Image (spheres, rainbow, N blue to C red):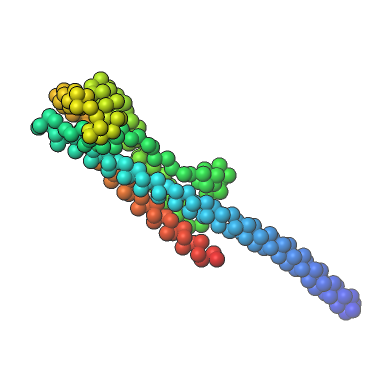
Amino acid sequence: MALRGVSLGSKTIEYLLELGLVVLGISASFWIENYREALGELKIEQEYLQGLREDLGRDTVALIAYRERQLARAEGCFALLRYVDTGTVPPDTFLVHFFAIINYQRFETHANTLREMESAGQFRLLRDRDLRKGILELQNLYVEVETAQEHQRYDQYEHLYPDLFRGPDFRTLLKGSSAVIPPTELQAFQGELKQLYKNRHFLNSLLVIGSNAQQSISNLEIALEQSRRLLRRIEGQLKKAR
């Protein structure tokens, strides 16, 4: 009886050891698989961070260029309005500000990496919550910039252009500076400019477009600072991973 009890006890211990080894093996396989998956996700995150850095770098350059165009547009409108009292503006001066005002080169964001992440459902792979939050905030700022662009486009095409292109013959200005324009044409053009400055709708359009451009600059500054802040954060994470 005693021998049988010892035999049963040893078998129980043997079974428990085998069961423990099986559980340990399964747990180890799960741990290894999770570790591999974590390494894979970490590699994917690094690739996304590099893509975001490139996109944000392009956005930063585009924001700076668009801010400069908005500054030139606002300055152009207000510069032309300074001649309201005299009703005459030097043709060369008018030409410089005129092209600054009608320059409608849009700001377009570079969001290839973000769109790829969202379409794959992998935005969560960015472990930095503040980075995720900052990216979403920047996208909202871009929406405001794009909305302001559409308003400016409407103001230019619906209010400014009809008065401009019904007024002076701008083909005169395309010949070059006033030094190379024949005196008779230059005199006729200056007379057309005087008539244009009597058009209150034209002057109001300049005021609206200049004010809107000036207002949009503040939003561009915020977006630019946010873009730079995100770039610094991404650079820091990429350096840690090296």
Q: Is residue 162 above or below residue 147?
A: above
* Residue 45, x across and y down, in percent: 55, 55
Residue 48 seen in the figure: yes
Please give the name of the residue rendered at 29% of the width and 25% of the height, measured from the top-left corner: 171
* Residue 232, x across and y down, in percent: 42, 59
Of residues 56 and 140, which is closer to you in this image?
56
* Residue 36, x across and y down, in percent: 66, 60
In the picture, the quarter occupied by the C terminus is bottom right
* Residue 133, x across and y down, in percent: 43, 51
Residue at the far bottom in the pictured view:
2
| Left or right of 41, for residue 175 | left
| Left or right of 24, for residue 219 | left
Q: Is residue 82 above or below residue 165?
A: below
Please give the name of the residue rendered at 52% of the width and 47% of the height, measured from the top-left corner: 113
In which quarter of the view is residue 174 placed?
A: top left
Please give the name of the residue rendered at 85% of the width and 72% of the height, measured from the top-left corner: 11
Residue 189 seen in the figure: no
In the picture, the quarter occupied by the N terminus is bottom right
Of residues 17 and 73, which is closer to you in this image?
73
In which quarter of the view is residue 188 placed?
A: top left
Residue at the far left in the pictured view:
85
In which quarter of the view is residue 91 placed?
A: top left
Please give the name of the residue rendered at 35% of the width and 32% of the height, measured from the top-left corner: 150
| Left or right of 94, for residue 148 | right
Of residues 208 and 162, which is closer to you in this image?
162
How many tags in the picture? 0
Residue at the far top in the pictured view:
166
